Image: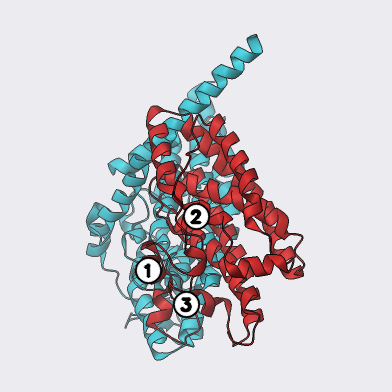
Chain colours: A red, B cyan
């Protein structure tokens, strides 16, 4: 990707990878959900996220040149090149963990895309403005489930608390910009994600209070996803995702 | 009115092509046959999500992934309409699902075959959905109103799925030698099970006669199977592939394709639970249901708490 606007490409890949990997995770539930209606709802979110990732990849392919396509970017990069948030690659676990992962991410994504819709880059502005309509629903659906599970039965509360302990260390990364993000934010194309930390915490606190759950404090945060240093999950995700393309290179599908 | 008068009115509706509606009087056996058939159809949609769901994570391009994900989701939606249609006859989704999990209720045996390669996603769309559509187009005119109306909606989406399946195979058939081989292999494996989808021969079919009289069915198993063979035998020419049947040939006298004998021993064995994936499919459904129990319990508990709080606030 020489000669191209590397910071912009990396930034777009970060946005694309994050939405693709969360979509990939959510789609593992398809056909296995706890209730048919919710199976369909989560698959719908997986489809929305996949659509968003394709928009970002397609744009990244144009900006990067080098004959890239959405598929070469998604299927032929390795785990050290993927730039998704660590949160999105975490296993589905039980329904509580899947729901919480979705809520923590969607709540952030909503606030973030609210800013990106005013990006100086008209393509990013258009993609995020369109996505916001979808994300608004994702926040509503997932926050309702957080409340239901937190304030449901004793068992569901225990499971929600376990999910909070598991996932919370991966939330800090959302508000720590990578260097390419800082550059892009400075150019008015991106937005400084650290600015969103406080309002995100307030929003989460409100939902957690209604769910009778407690927001953890002083948790040491894991980082690295934005720069390609992932958890051990990543290799397995890409092994599945990329299997056909790797086994039969240079084919049309 | 005496029962015979009710029967007479029911018969007249059937004869005059007036749909039977949920509140109409209907013979018990008509009700039971419809419950059996509609719930079996709903279960087929839900179990049918599994062999295709198996390839969502490995779809070879983002576009194919999106198409497959949307397709499997559509099947879930079809399951929903069909469970609702069956509920109008006085059963509940919980009862129907319990019958599926106990093995009392059946689903289409085709889903007891494994989806082994990417080409299977094309073959399932083209052959399995293709066979299902012939049955479903007929069911758009079935005599029970809610079932017929659910079918109209479902048919629109299914014919789209079939075209997508064919197009998936078309790309493979024009691809590398490995892709062509993958395409032919999938057709070889799915062809005979697809023919079996139409059920036993008319001479062996226990439920057919009465269902025809009640206009639940309007074509026999063998008629639909012939229609399917005639359609696919032509479409495969476009793919440049072959169907795995040495006896398949055009018969100008009958104006239909002749085709070989189905392996009925295999058919009955898969129906009885001995297919390659019967155990895995049912276990996957049971596991999803059992592991979802605490989720459904929590949702219910929360809804009750919320209602109690609202009532308390209203009283205050």
For disc 1, the marked residue is A235
Q: Position of residue A108 (x, y in %)?
A: 60, 51
Furthest residue in direction top, as rendered: B316
Callout 1: few (<14), some (14-19), or many (20+) C-alpha neighbours within 10 Å? Answer: some
The quadrant in which residue A199 appears is top right
**Residue plotted at (69% across, 52% down):** A133
Measure how far apart labels 2 and 1 are at the Cα level: 31 Å
- In the rendered image, the quadrant that contains the C terminus of chain B is top right
Measure how far apart labels 3 and 2 are at the Cα level: 33 Å
- In the image, B194 versus B250, the foreground residue is B194
Q: Position of residue B196 (x, y in %)?
A: 35, 64
Please, is residue B298 above or below residue A173 in the view?
A: above
For disc 3, the marked residue is A77
* Callout 2 touching callout 1 (CB < 8 Å): no
* Callout 3 touching callout 2 (CB < 8 Å): no
- In the rendered image, the quadrant that contains the N terminus of chain B is top right
For disc 2, the marked residue is B75
Q: Position of residue B288 (x, y in %)?
A: 36, 46
Q: The residue marked by circle 3 belongs to what chain?
A: A
Please, is residue A135 above or below residue A158 in the view?
A: below
């Amino acid at each position: 990707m020489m000669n191209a606007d590397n910071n912009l490409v990396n930034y777009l890949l970060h946005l694309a990878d994050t939405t693709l990997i969360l979509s990939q995770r959510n789609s593992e539930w398809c056909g296995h959900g706890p209730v048919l209606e919710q199976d369909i709802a989560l698959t719908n979110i997986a489809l929305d996220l996949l659509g968003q990732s394709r928009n970002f990849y397609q744009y990244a392919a144009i900006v990067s040149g080098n004959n890239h396509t959405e598929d070469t970017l998604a299927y032929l990069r390795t785990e050290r090149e993927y730039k998704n948030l660590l949160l999105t690659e975490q296993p589905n676990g039980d329904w509580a963990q899947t729901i919480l992962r979705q809520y923590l991410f969607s709540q952030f994504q909503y606030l973030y895309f609210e800013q990106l819709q005013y990006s100086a880059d008209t393509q990013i502005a258009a993609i995020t403005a369109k996505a916001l309509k979808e994300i608004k629903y994702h926040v509503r659906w997932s926050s309702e489930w957080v409340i239901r599970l937190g304030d449901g039965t004793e068992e569901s509360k225990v499971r929600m608390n376990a999910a909070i302990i598991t996932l919370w260390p991966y939330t800090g990364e959302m508000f720590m910009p990578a260097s390419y993000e800082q550059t892009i934010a400075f150019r008015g194309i991106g937005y400084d994600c650290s600015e969103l930390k406080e309002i995100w915490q307030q929003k989460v606190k409100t939902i957690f209070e209604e769910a009778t759950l407690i927001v953890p404090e002083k948790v040491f945060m894991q980082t690295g996803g934005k720069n390609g240093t992932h958890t051990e999950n990543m290799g397995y995700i890409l092994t599945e995702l990329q299997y056909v393309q790797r086994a039969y290179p240079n084919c049309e599908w | 009115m005496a029962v015979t008068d009710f029967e007479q009115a029911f018969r007249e509706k059937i004869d005059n092509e007036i749909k039977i509606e949920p509140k109409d009087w209907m013979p018990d056996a008509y009700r039971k046959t419809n419950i059996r058939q509609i719930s079996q159809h709903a279960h087929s949609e839900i179990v049918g999500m599994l062999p295709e769901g198996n390839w969502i994570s490995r779809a070879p391009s983002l576009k194919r992934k999106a198409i497959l994900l949307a397709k499997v989701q559509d099947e879930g939606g079809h399951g929903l309409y069909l469970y609702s249609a069956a509920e109008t006859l006085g059963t509940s989704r919980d009862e129907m699902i319990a019958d599926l999990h106990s093995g009392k209720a059946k689903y289409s045996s085709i889903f007891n075959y494994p989806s082994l390669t990417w080409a299977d996603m094309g073959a399932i769309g083209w052959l399995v959905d293709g066979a299902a559509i012939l049955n479903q187009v007929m069911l758009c005119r079935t005599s029970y109103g809610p079932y017929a109306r659910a079918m109209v909606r479902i048919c629109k989406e299914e014919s789209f799925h079939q075209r997508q399946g064919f197009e998936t195979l078309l790309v493979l058939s024009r691809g590398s030698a490995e892709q062509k081989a993958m395409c032919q292999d999938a057709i070889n494996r799915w062809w005979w099970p697809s023919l079996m989808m139409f059920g036993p021969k008319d001479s062996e079919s226990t439920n057919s006669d009465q269902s025809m009289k009640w206009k639940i069915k309007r074509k026999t198993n063998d008629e639909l199977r012939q229609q399917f063979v005639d359609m696919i035998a032509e479409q495969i020419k476009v793919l440049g592939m072959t169907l795995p049947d040495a006896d398949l040939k055009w018969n100008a006298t009958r104006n239909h394709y002749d085709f070989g004998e189905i392996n009925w021993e295999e058919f009955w064995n898969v129906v009885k639970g001995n297919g390659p994936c019967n155990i895995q499919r049912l276990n996957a459904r049971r596991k999803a249901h059992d592991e979802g129990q605490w989720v459904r319990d929590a949702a219910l508990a929360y809804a009750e708490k919320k209602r109690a709080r609202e009532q308390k606030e209203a009283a205050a």
